[in-house]
Amino acid sequence: MSLLESLFIWPNRPLPSLLVLLVLLMPFLYAAREPMHALLRSMCRSIANPLRLGARWLADTGLRLRNRNREVLFAHGSHEVKLTIEREFEHVTMLVQRDLEGYPVLQRKLMDEITRIEEDYKKSGEVPPPPPEWVKAIEAIAKIKPSGDGVVERILSDIRDSLDEIYQKLVAEYRGAYQERHHILKGFLPFWRSVSQTLTQVDRNITSLQNSAAKIDANVLKLENIAARGNDAANVLATSATTQFFIAGLVMLIAFGGAYVNFKLIALPMSAMVGGGDYITESLQASEVAALVIILFETLMGLFLMETLRFTSLFPLGNITEKMRRRLMWASLTILLVLAGVEVALAVMRDMIITADVALKQQLGAAAGAVKTEAGWVTRIPTFGQMILGFTLPFALAFVAIPLEYFINSGRTVVGAGLEMALRGLAFMLRFTANLIRGAGKLAIMLYDVFIFVPLAIERWIVGYREGAARRNKLRPVPPLKRAGGSEEAL
């Protein structure tokens, strides 16, 4: 029998018993109405106020985190834009030093050659010299009319023949001179072609300089927008950081796939080197740990190699000299080559282990004579493939340093934005829960009043009756007083 059933007046009739108990408890509940209201309000405040304080603290923390994220975002964006501008200036400097350094000499040589060509061209276009004075005498003789005299005709014929010979000789000399000049001009055609190609290359270099200058101007404008700390610049930087984060994450996921393939490639032969029966834990073999250490060491050497080549800036190597940097680069490259060679040897060992395992299984299964294996270079293709993978995968893992740097730099922004959203969402949930608790307290008070509605109705009726009586007493007129003489005097 439960506690509630023990309170029943009529155990076989629970509903009338509950009604009687309600009637008996109603005066006590009415008497405890104010303390119960105060208790419910205190309980709700004791729960809702800490929640509201926690929500306010989380909102303030989210605001501070947002400001911090903006500072980090602007600082990283400014650094990236400055590096881009520096690279563009280096590109411009390289173009100027490589292509435009000898341009003044080329221009001077070009002007000299053009001057020579112009002079030769002018010489090739000169008019013949004027005829000598004796030509006038010959013209006078040529005006003599034929008279039929044979001596005169013979003299005139001899003069004409002499003039024809002189004319032919002069024409031949002038043609030879013109041919010589044209031969000189023809010799300048290759030079003109070379000059045209040089000018085209110079124009291409100038165009490249103009493009670099336009990129520098655009980056300077972007840097000014970042320095202004505007919302547009913040949105652009946040979008760029998010894109870089997901792209770098995808590239690193692909790199993890390559590392897994590399792990599977060397895990089996490592068991022959460190012992296949050695276990560090119940499910972790020593050979697997050794293979993982080799892969991590290759990745570490790749990180140092990319760092010394200035492809990344993950480590503070600015305080070392260039000589030490080159030594570190060659040391990292040498160790990486040695590890790649070790993986090639392990790949060959893996193929030998698999071949021996297959032969052993065939012998144990008494199928050695039934199975024929093809001999030749075809059977060595898997070995060659494993050797190529063992040599190339360490160098492929070395390039994971580049997406890793972008992943870390952009991850600060993305993770900070996600943490800010989480704090704001948690603050909203706490505030919402606090409001729900306050509403639940009010609902509990109302339900308590509904539970004791009979005494409350009686109380309201009594209060209303007293207020009505008081109003009627205020509106009732005062009766006059009578004196002994029969006159009336108001109070």
Image: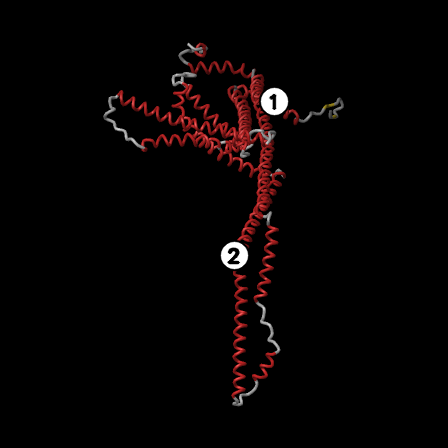
Q: Nearer the viewer, residue 415 or 359?
A: 359
Percent coordinates x, y for residue 144 in the rendering: 56, 86
- Amino acid at dot 1: Arg
Q: Which structural element holds mark 2?
A: helix
Q: Nearer the viewer, residue 103 or 227?
A: 103
Farthest residue to the left: give it.
370
Residue drawn at (48%, 29%), measured in percent from left and top?
Answer: 336
Farthest residue to the front: give it.
151
Label 2 Cα crowd, 10 Å radius (few <14 / some 14-19 / many 20+):
few
Image quarter in which the C terminus is found = top right
Residue 3 visible from this viewpoint: yes
Image quarter in which the N terminus is found = top left
Residue 417 visible from this viewpoint: no
Q: Earlier in the sequence, mark 2 or mark 1?
A: 2
Residue drawn at (54%, 69%), measured in percent from left and top?
Answer: 173
Percent coordinates x, y for residue 482 in the rendering: 73, 23
Percent coordinates x, y for residue 140 in the rendering: 59, 83
Q: Which structural element holds mark 1?
A: helix
Residue 245 located left or right of residue 102: left
Q: Dot 2 corresponds to which residue?
A: 190
292 over 228 or under it: above or below: above
Farthest residue to the right: give it.
485
115 over 96 or under it: above or below: below
Give the distance between the C-alpha atoms of the residues marked 2 and 1, in whole angstroms: 126 Å
Percent coordinates x, y for residue 454 in the rendering: 52, 20
Q: Dot 1 corresponds to which residue?
A: 466
